[in-house]
Image (spheres, rainbow, N blue to C red):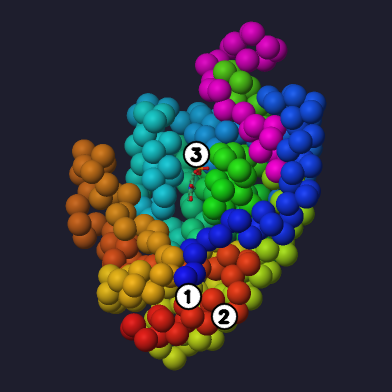
Amino acid sequence: MNVAFLDLKRQYASIKEELDQAVFDVLAHAKFIMGPEVKTFEEKVAEYCETKSAVGVASGTDALLLSLRACGVGPGDEVITTGFSFFATAGVITRLGATPVYVDIDPDTYNIDPGQIEKKITSKTKAIMPVHLYGQCADMDPIMEIAKRHNLKVVEDAAQAIGSKYKGKKAGSLGHFGCFSFFPSKNLGAAGDGGMVVTNDPEMADLLRMLRVHGAKPKYYHSIVGYNSRLDTIQAAILGVKLKYLDGWTQKRREHAQVYDDAFKDSSITTPKEENFNYHIYHQYTIAVKNRDKLREVLKENQIGHDVYYPVPLHLQECYKSLGYKEGDLPVIEAKSREVVSIPIYPELTADEQNYVIQTIKGAV
Ligand SMILES: Cc1ncc(COP(=O)(O)O)c(C=O)c1O
């Protein structure tokens, strides 16, 4: 048997007619830039996330970049974030001339440890950027409380977490800005790049709308310098169709997660911990094992797709050498980066395939 890590062709087959029609409709009306589907999709996302506004942008990376810009982050500022995330989380901070300040993670959820944030705050700190890693929200109440006390903005990197909930509230609606990625492999994925910022602040939403069109308002009048970062109409049309199915797909992911949880219960494998106040959407099902690299070899031999998120913590990336971090500075992250591996969890995974994955892993650890 051969089990793909993710098979998007199955998803397409299940909703082909609707998706094809949505794309053909855009080709026919030809409003490729900021066409009507963009606004419709923004309204649907704002409703879905229970926020006042949603602003479509070109990628999840740009959602973070534009949000930090809207917070006023610039040269000399510091932004506190986790050292265990995709590179974009850190890259956007650096691109604005600011400095990422890394905090260690909670060993159970892999999310930023709120108890370690306050000691990293300085007079230069402008914002906190928690990441809802693998699809589970960071512990937002203490983060928002610290931010309020120090007058800081909070930008949620919810790139992996659309539909996830914290104490009943949707990811993205908890901080000042919530940023989503529609990279094809995300739970809500486009047929290319795409992103969205949600916010409850209408002035900030207006600023984001300016920033995505070179800072123009009205057209050709630039009081600030922005970016070319719009969500494509074709992507918005595709995403508008897929959003209807998102909660059903999440349910399937959660069922698969339960099957894995039960199967690995009495083994040496550490399974994901869903906090009792969270609703995890299992963008990834990530296990931790001591002999991770041996397990990877067995998975490869048995043609089971898998990946490691992330093998090199952000504070130890070569491009951040000048920040002066060294091995041992963020011990939980460093240990987890050697132990984690994510295994297939996509909604269309069959019971036979999942059973094959389980038996192979059990035989290897
Ligand atoms: C945690 C995190 N932040 C940011 C991004 C960037 O999103 P994008 O690839 O859409 O630019 C991603 C996804 O790739 C991500 O997983």
The residue pinned by badge 2 equals 352
Whether residue 51 is visible here, answered yes or no, is: no
**Residue on which disc 1 sits:** 1
Q: Is mark 3 within 8 Å of ligand 1?
A: yes
The answer to which quarter of the image holds residue 155 is top right
- Residue 309 versus residue 343: which sits nearer the camera? 343
* CB within 8 Å, label 1 to label 2: yes
- Which of the 4 image quarters holds residue 15? bottom right
The magenta span reads 216-238
Q: Farthest residue in the top direction? A: 221
Determine the main secondary structure of the stretch shown in magenta.
Answer: loop
Q: Could you tell me how far apart the alpha carbons at marks 1 and 3 are, in whole angstroms?
A: 36 Å
Badge 3 density bin: few <14, some 14–19, many ≥20, Cα 10 Å:
many
Question: In the image, 281: left or right of 36?
Answer: left
Q: Residues within 10 Å of mark 2 (few under 14, many from 20)?
A: few
In front of the other: 325 or 4: 4
